[in-house]
Image: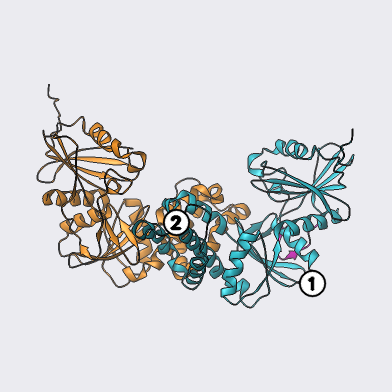
Chain colours: A orange, B cyan
Amino acid sequence: MTLAHAIRPDWIAVDWGTSNLRAFAMTEDGSTLAEASSDKGMSSLKPDEFEPALRALLQDWETPSTCTVIACGMVGSRQGWLEAPYRATPCMAQTDRPIPVQNCGDDLKVWLIPGIKQNDPADVMRGEETQIAGFLSLNPEWDGVICLPGTHSKWVHVSAGEIVSFRTFMTGELFDVISKGTVLRHSLGGTDMDQKAFDEAASETLSRPEKFSANLFSLRAADLLKGQSPAIARAKLSGALIGMELAAAKSYWLGQRVAVIGTNDLSDLYERALNQQSVTVERYDTAAVTRAGLCTAYAAI
Amino acid sequence: MTLAHAIRPDWIAVDWGTSNLRAFAMTEDGSTLAEASSDKGMSSLKPDEFEPALRALLQDWETPSTCTVIACGMVGSRQGWLEAPYRATPCMAQTDRPIPVQNCGDDLKVWLIPGIKQNDPADVMRGEETQIAGFLSLNPEWDGVICLPGTHSKWVHVSAGEIVSFRTFMTGELFDVISKGTVLRHSLGGTDMDQKAFDEAASETLSRPEKFSANLFSLRAADLLKGQSPAIARAKLSGALIGMELAAAKSYWLGQRVAVIGTNDLSDLYERALNQQSVTVERYDTAAVTRAGLCTAYAAI
């Protein structure tokens, strides 16, 4: 029996990160019929658990008898399903032919998109290369700097279709461990953020990055002594971390065309902080460019 | 029956921090007969659990029929046994009369040493004020800057027996959450530290603090791409954090007489980093000055 609303994809696009697995039911022309996700991220799986996790996620869809799956992200890391060796900068931004996973059975053909490495200064990306390829497929001939804020924010210099250089900043992960794992957790509850406090902290830390360290404990002391609100403390921490990132990434954004690819909340913060430095940004949504990038890789196999 | 080696203190000195409780069996003249410790730190106790935790620790000693206990540290915080209100800077470095805890029974007289607050920039200390008082009792007339490295490092300007100002840096706690709670944990195992890598990272971050953020992820990438050793990565993280602290504390140490009060390992690192900036330091052990400070408070009641 066929379900009334059966999903019949031509192929499957997969964004498989450290913490989550997301699959998209795709048509030949690049439309998305449906999506599914689970918490079976790379970090929770042993090598032989990737195939069952993928099959479980696809079971409600009527996939082709030989189903092509294109996956990006940490699934291709050394701790993932299979290591898809890095390409090295400078390199074409468009993804090469992905790496096939062997031994999945005749009904499943899985391909992993390689990450990109940079030897000096040492840096790596896995997943963002797919977003960049997707972004450029949607914006051919685009030259400039792409900022991808997140757990590990990236700044990527793109010129003439090449990734020239990039740097990674642990901004999101630092916010996470500082706000949850230190004494500041008592002063940073909730999710609200005061915009003025964010702007001031971002601007101050950008111009005087050495104050970062002293300003952290002040968040606790201002709570104890003056009852400073968590919304102000959160905004100051976020502003200080993003200001520090912008200070270090200045050679990337200063005088450049800048695109920000991220979720809405995070892109808002980066746009505010960059606007304060008289930098306007073009904004793109992570999910859309990721899927576009997986489509370019599908076209390449 | 009296034990052959019974400990008969005249009074008890206590260092009661967030994670640990340490008691010292003291004589009138300030000698230490014995010490005892437990993991009953402030953070693991409700207000009515402090007295039993203290009594349990003292049970093997033959205390006086009315036993005086002088305690410093987080035991006197709002989350502690009883809040001993902060004194405000500028203030005498010698501790005032401590705050008595009521209702312990006639056999136990407990006194808590107040912490010190600073209104602008907002900052607080609890425990370090006792170390500073002890340091000055051992070094009367000493003027200069005292650095107390640790979970929350302090820089304290002391002049003419007064605490003029101070700043707190979350250096130790940041090292802890970054090395254990982020992706860097995969690249920072063990306890070894490469001295040359520490020196370079401390010096670079002191002069270019904005690079702190970019250099963090490089520790991971250099492991993945070049097999950088954990001893080098740990040293670079430690050097970067201490370099950042020294950059922010420069107005404290530049051109000043500097004393470092800390554990040996940590004081070594601060001394190396300060020596690179042509600053020589006088070193003192935390345990010794803490006990000296508790003695001055005992003399004040």
x and y percent of residue A224 in the render?
62, 52
> Taking A59 as reference, is B203 above or below it?
below
Residue drawn at (85%, 47%), measured in percent from left and top?
A: B11
Query: For the residue marked with disc 1, what is the amino acid?
Result: Glu
Query: For the residue marked with disc 2, what is the amino acid?
Result: Ser
* Cα–Cα gap, marks 1 and 2: 43 Å
Q: Is residue B91 magenta?
A: yes
Res. A155 image quadrant: bottom left
Q: Does the image show residue B146?
A: yes
Q: What segment carries the magenta color? A: B87-96
- Both on one chain, marks 1 and 2? no
x and y percent of residue B207 in the render?
49, 73
Q: Residue furthest top?
A: A1
Would you name the residue on which mark 1 appears? B141
Q: Is residue B93 left or right of residue A40?
A: right
Would you name the residue on which mark 2 appears? A238
Q: Residue furthest front?
A: B4
Res. B152 image quadrant: bottom right
> Taking B76 as reference, is B252 above or below it?
below
Subunit of label 1: B
Q: Main secondary structure of the magenta part?
A: loop
Residue drawn at (48%, 66%), measured in percent from left and top?
A: B197
Subunit of label 2: A
Secondary structure of the residue carrying tag 1 is loop
Q: Nearer the viewer, residue A277 or B145?
A: B145
Residue drawn at (30%, 48%), measured in percent from left and top?
A: A74
Q: Is residue B186 left or right of residue A77?
A: right
Q: Does the image show residue B89?
A: no
Q: Is residue B299 left or right of residue B126?
A: right
